[in-house]
Image (cartoon, rainbow, N blue to C red):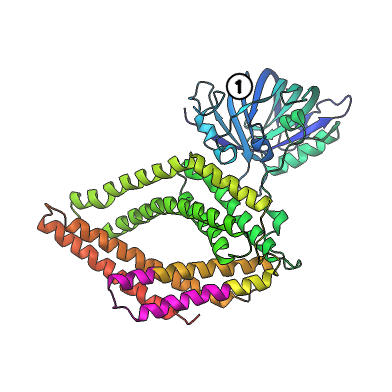
Amino acid sequence: MTAHEALEIELKYDLNAGASVPDLTVLDAVQSVTGPVVEHLDATYYDTDALDLAGNKITLRRREGGHDEGWHLKRPATSAGPGRREMQVGLETAADPFSEVLVPTELTDHVQVHVRGRRLSPIATISTVRRITELHDSAGQVLAVLCEDSVATQSLLPGGHAQTWNEWELELVAGDEKLLKAADKVLRSSGARTASSASKLARAIGPTPTGSDSTRHGGKKSAAKKLSALELVIAELAEHRDHLIAQDPLVRVDAPDSVHQMRVATRRARSVLRSFPEVLHGDVIGHLEGELKHLAGILGDARDAEVQLERNRHLLEGESAPATIIAALVDDQIRTCGSTVEVVLDYLRSTRYYNLLNELDSTVAEPQPGPDSDLTATKALDEAVARSAKRVRKAQRKLEGLTVESAEWIEQLHTIRKRAKQLRYTTDSADRLGTDKYRKIAKQAKQEQAALGDFHDAEVSREHLAQLAGGSGISVADAFVYGRLDAREQAAAQIAMREYLKAKSRL
């Protein structure tokens, strides 16, 4: 069964003694109310022994009774806006074979980046008697729902205990923030007050460990604080780790651009380690950098296949290509994309990947300092940019001694592109220090990288076209079309090279 996700926007209240539901038709938008309808809800909540879900403000439950019984996964909204994302599947869905309980795979895939193969088990039971009142507009549309809940919980954690309380929840349906604000004022005047806990589960089990928090390692911009090199590196590493973690569930559901974004996060995390090689202990950098490289390679294969498919489709626009060429450039490439994504998904389910995430977490939380850890962030960045720029210049000098358009020449351009990208990533760390000292260098590096990226993509495409055109059984007509496509890619490569030469500088 397919999981359905919606944004849940609600207000939650504790109640003063003697509080009673007011007349909500006093609200301008509300024409009538219906109910209350009574439901009896019995839910079991699941998490790891370390409460990895709760620590990341995620709840996973199996609930029987009510109009929406089933498995529910609640996660923070993807933006800074209000509400939470709630995903639901039925009780009869297929289970995750790696879970101790029968948790649906449709939901566990979205939280494996936090669970990381650890077992999910019951941590609390919550029984609720719910009285539901619907607020309608003049057309009969449901604007919001008020739930009067009598709650009984039992924590299943060591030392856990039972609790009972009453609360109100007001959830938007078709209403807007204006209605929510007006209703909040009316409810508070009738004995409601801000809930002491964000959720029933939080109240049932008490304080939980806090998930990854990069802000304690320097924040996004800390010009007012004199960061050390170690603080800079850890803040950067934490930011890219968090971006990687955010993309994980999106990659698992094949969301657009998610593979690309996860690849960028992986490369940037690796770039931090390479740019500041003496800030962390060498053993840490060596192993972690190697694992990030491995992940970047797997993601790179999938991303390159996506790019090639997009390029092939663009090449065929306006062409009267025969079905054989469409099959080779589109249909076969779609299958290649599918197979490379499956390799990514296999890796994301592996112990090796979970170990990488754990190593990133431990490095951020408890870094092992290297010889340059006590340098100021400014000095460490100055040295890193100088090293990276020097590597770009060295690669450019080597290019000058190679035969133009030879295989070695083309490969050296690829090396320059990678080094220019490394330089750009390094200069990006200046944002955290609130300085634009490297803005010009960053701009030039980005221009060179972009131009050489276009050149590389065109050359890879030409190589692919040549392989297809040289295959056995190719008709003269097909060979002619392949030749025309190759000419277009050759022209694209020449344009990209002119752009590179224009942007090139002696960094």
Residue furthest right as drawn: 17
Q: Secondary structure at mark 1?
A: loop
Judge left or right: residue 314 versus residue 273.
left
For disc 1, the neighbor class at 10 Å (few under 14, some 14 to 19, many from 20) is few
What amino acid is at disc 1?
Answer: His
The residue drawn where x is 71% and y is 28% is 32
Where 120 sits versus 364, above or below? above
Q: Which residue is mark 1?
A: 67
Where 242 sits versus 103, above or below? below
Specify whether residue 15 is in view: yes
Q: Position of residue 331 (x, y in %)?
A: 27, 46
The residue drawn where x is 45% and y is 69% is 449
Judge left or right: residue 392 versus residue 232.
left
Between 198 and 286, which is closer to the camera in this rendering? 286
Q: Position of residue 115 (x, y in %)?
A: 59, 37
Q: Is residue 410 magenta?
A: yes
Please report the bounds of the magenta region as a residue range. 385-414
Where 50 sits versus 260, above or below? above
Q: Could you tell me what secondary structure mostly forms the magenta stretch?
A: helix
